[in-house]
Amino acid sequence: MVVEIISVGTEILMGNIVNTNAQYLAKRLAHLGLDCHFQTVVGDNPERIKSALDVAYSRADAVIMTGGLGPTKDDLTKEMLIDYFGKTPVVDAQVLNFLEERAKARGFDKLSDGMKKQAVVPADSLILYNHHGTAPGCVMERDGKVCILLPSVPKEMAPMFEECCELYLNAKSDKILVSIIIKCLSKFDAPLAVVGESPVADRLAELLDGVNPTVATYAKEDGCIVRVTAAGKTHEDALALLTPVVDKCRERIGEQYIKYVKEDTD
């Protein structure tokens, strides 16, 4: 299954915040064995969001969107998606009751219109209740298209994904991805001509052309990283593919220039 990430928020485009949500989701999708080929950032504009969706569904099976679920006027993602998927907006009594109780606890007699709209959800969809904030997320499906809508606040988005979405997406995947990280010494601990990304890549040579497992090098300030990744039906199957390739990489780099080797679980 191919999943695309669309992050909604003019504040991201303007450089006011760093898009950590996309980084988090990309890592989680990789661990679930789901392919993610593209990430998109779009501002809070219904037409541009729709355009981004049209493009995404031309090359992906599912989309994960973050942002646009809040109480302000520029939070339009949910409303736009309800229209895009041809759903009927309905009030979720559980969410509305929660919002009303929250308002009373804070000394307010009634909910504002902005807060009320957070209780409006698409009918015939999977509602993802927010245990760390107010706005619920949802999963919408139609004509083979799937969209998972999550809050933009990281402390709300990450738990919602882990509590609700991983199980849903795991059922859609027929493989898992496992990665082994080989961390080389930094240039301060060994000659740069040995441990820099280019010299390491030269030593790995044709191993970098592998398909499963794949081998890739990354330059870091504190030393080059080599990531070996394999796809398998089980964790054990992936490790069985990884082990001989990791051994070849270690041999070519030289154990004396390797700081550590570990499975990537971040």
Image (cartoon, rainbow, N blue to C red):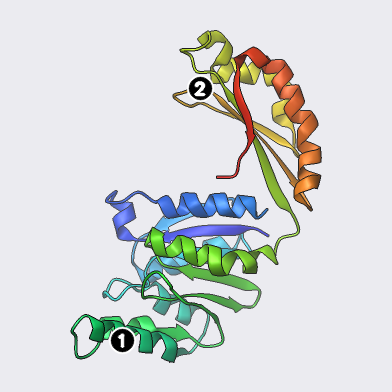
Give the spatial CA distance, label 1 vs label 2: 52 Å
- In the rendered structure, the answer to whether residue 37 lies left or right of residue 206 reads left
Residue 94 image-quadrant placement: bottom left
What secondary structure is marked by label 1? Answer: helix
- Mark 1, residue position: 101
Locate the C terminus and report the quarter of the image it occupies: top right
Name the kind of residue labelled 2 in the image: Gly
- In the rendered structure, the answer to whether residue 109 lies left or right of residue 76 reads left
Q: Position of residue 225 (x, y in %)?
A: 57, 28
Q: In the image, is residue 6 above or below residue 190?
A: below
Task: Single out the mark in the foreground, 1 or 2.
Answer: 1
Q: Are marks 1 and 2 in contact (CB under 8 Å)?
A: no
* Residue at the (27%, 81%) spot, across then down: 114
- Mark 2, residue position: 223
Q: In the image, is residue 33 above or below residue 169?
A: above
What secondary structure is marked by label 2? Answer: loop
- In the rendered structure, the answer to whether residue 175 lies left or right of residue 103 reads right
